[in-house]
Image: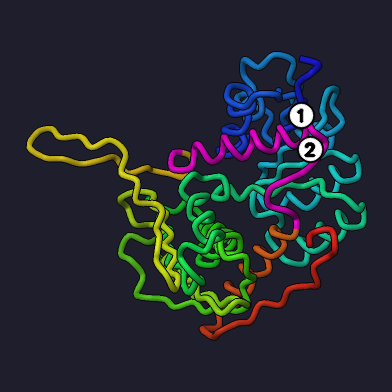
Amino acid sequence: MGDLLGVAVLGAGHMGADHVRRLDRVVSGARVAAVADPDAARAEKAAAGIEGVSLHTEAEAALDAPGVGAVLIASPGPAHEEALLAAFARGLPVFCEKPMVPDSAGALRVLETEARRGRRLAQIGFMRRYDTGYRGLKALLDDGRLGRPLMLHCTHRNVSSPPGFTSAMLIDSSVSHEIDAARWLLGQELTAVTVLRPRPSAGAPDGLLDPQFVLFETDGGALVDVEVFVNCGFGYQVRCEAVGEAGSARVGDDHGVLVTAHGSAGTDVPRDYLVRFADAYDREVQAWVDATRRGVVTGPSAWDGYAASAVAEAGVRALESGARVTVDLAPRPDLYR
């Protein structure tokens, strides 16, 4: 076990427990050294059967646990800033689930703290960059086969929203993935956002503005539109089509196994993101472990985390005001150029 990267997992909820499972059973080169969650029973359940793991109710206690050489943050977004800064202070490499920090001011503090250290420590969990389809689309855009990109058309649908889900969360929780994917695919920053609101679906909880239609402008002159519909009822669907001057390409239409029985034919529709992006989650955590063991940090950076928070914040203002809102990004530190 001494040659394995010891990872402290902060947060043992739905996402955190899945990462504990992934580190223990799927990813090579790592082991779960500690698990922290304010709910001790939840931490114990997530770590059940794992040899040598220590359990904690405080995040910093897990960071200081014996054998910890890296940190995976899967706690709720408001807890991320404190956990990231604590990991930075100890020089620990971090994988942090999105959002890096929900508010742009906090995200900027994290960005500036890491930049002052003069080296990257954090990889942010935008898993679509590790999805086979999205990677293929990125390659097409980068090699110019589609010509100069003009538009991205995106769809983001969930079966249902969890209790307490707000209209703003359609943008700063759900569309945050499209924000990062668009920046990465196009190699451009998002500069303005407009949010249009059709009549709410009858399937949406009272008061929830669902669906929404979000339009982004980029500094390269492209447009990105996103249909976000978090109570569609029929499945989890994520699609993205890139339209260029010389062609178009779309991901997200994979239909899996076609089953014909009882006089009809059909395929299963994924019910949530952990099913649809299972391979991408495995691939991104494996990439983080491999890089960390080499002493480097790759993947989405703290700058990407900050930019996503800043754009989402502008999107929420656009939702609330009904106006087009420009995105104001701080200067990018040299570390992230």
- Amino acid at the residue labelled 2: Ala
Q: Point out the image quarter for the N terminus.
A: top right
Residue 310, x across and y down, in percent: 68, 69
Quarter occupied by residue 260: top left
Camera-side residue: 191 or 7? Answer: 191
Residue 158 visible in the picture:
no
Confirm whether the magenta stretch covers residue 283: yes
The dominant secondary structure in magenta is helix
Q: Which mark is residue 56?
A: 1
Residue 220, x across and y down, in percent: 60, 76
Q: Residues within 10 Å of mark 2 (few under 14, many from 20)?
A: many
Q: Is residue 282 above or below residue 123?
A: above
**Tags 2 and 1 touching, CB below 8 Å:** yes
Residue 296, x across and y down, in percent: 80, 40
Q: Which residues are magenta?
A: 275-302
Q: Is residue 211 above or below residue 123?
A: below
Residue at 50% across, 51% down: 134
Quarter occupied by residue 186: bottom right
Residue 58 visible in the picture:
yes
Residue carrying label 2: 59
Residue 127, x across and y down, in percent: 57, 47
Residue at 45% across, 70% down: 244
Camera-side residue: 103 or 236? Answer: 236
Q: Point out the image quarter for the C terminus.
A: bottom right
- Amino acid at the residue labelled 1: His
Please tell me whether mark 2 sits on a helix, a strand or a loop: helix
Residue furthest to the left in view is: 263
